Image (cartoon, rainbow, N blue to C red):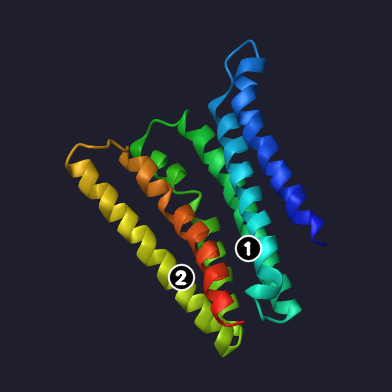
Amino acid sequence: MKRAAPWLLLAGAVLCGAGAAILPRMLSGPVPGWLNYLLVVLGLVLAFVALLRWQLPEACDTAPSPLRRRYSRELMLAMGGYVLVLFASITLLRHVEAPALRAMVALLPVPPIALALRAMVRYIRDVDEMQQRIELEAVSLATGFISLVYMSAGFLQAARVIDVPASAALIWLFPLVCFTYGLAKAVVSRRYR
């Protein structure tokens, strides 16, 4: 993709966000919660990919093209599977009552995330030492920052200043680390130009 591609991705992200905001007002009946959730998540993913397209190709990644293609293919397949399995899991949980079966259905999205982590580890193992150093610094900064944010939120929750449901806090931990890692990678890689 050329330089115009990030703008197209960003436009898609804005359209998804606008759709999530406007859709409830346009439809006369109630909008399914999963549809708004899907639009918001898709918009965030498109915005993140646009940011990566602006920053990563020349600035952050010295890996050979075949390695980048393999990583992209494995990661996109895993994340696509995750989205499909997540929505299947959410739908099935509405119809399942047995606790053991509910636990199994609730954990269905975990294997695709494990496949995404496997793709990340394989990529980091196969790049050169300089790229490994960039990856290590980025993941360290992201993990440290998100840990600090979560600990601060925990103190605020304990003091009853905020009230965040535990399920929301736990579910968003990994996506926040990934998002922050992408931003940190763009910043760290600038130091090595």
Q: Position of residue 57 (x, y in %)?
A: 70, 70
Checking the image for residue 75, the label placed there is 1
| Residue farthest to the left, as pictured | 159
Tell me the element at label 1: helix
Say which label, 2 or 1, has the lower sequence index.
1
Q: Is residue 85 visible?
A: yes
Lateral position of residue 78 relative to residue 15, left or right? left
Q: Nearer the viewer, residue 162 or 123?
A: 162
Kind of residue at disc 1: Leu
Kind of residue at disc 2: Val
Relative height, residue 117 to residue 7 (above, below): below
For disc 2, the marked residue is: 139
Mark 2 → mark 1, Cα distance in angstroms: 17 Å
In this view, the mark in front (2 or 1): 2
Q: Nearer the viewer, residue 113 or 26?
A: 26
Q: Nearer the viewer, residue 74 or 152?
A: 152
| Residue at figure coordinates x 58%, y 30% from the top left | 36
Q: Position of residue 107 (x, y in %)?
A: 44, 49
Quarter-wise, where is residue 14 in the image? top right
Q: Are marks 2 and 1 in contact (CB under 8 Å)?
A: no
Quadrant in which the N terminus is drawn? bottom right
Checking the image for residue 48, the label placed there is none
Q: Position of residue 155 (x, y in %)?
A: 21, 48
Relative height, residue 66 to residue 7 (above, below): below
| Residue farthest to the bottom, as pictured | 129
Tell me the element at label 2: helix
Quadrant in which the C terminus is drawn? bottom right
Q: Position of residue 136 (x, y in %)?
A: 47, 78
Lateral position of residue 92 relative to residue 147, left or right? right
| Residue at figure coordinates x 53%, y 79% from the top left | 134
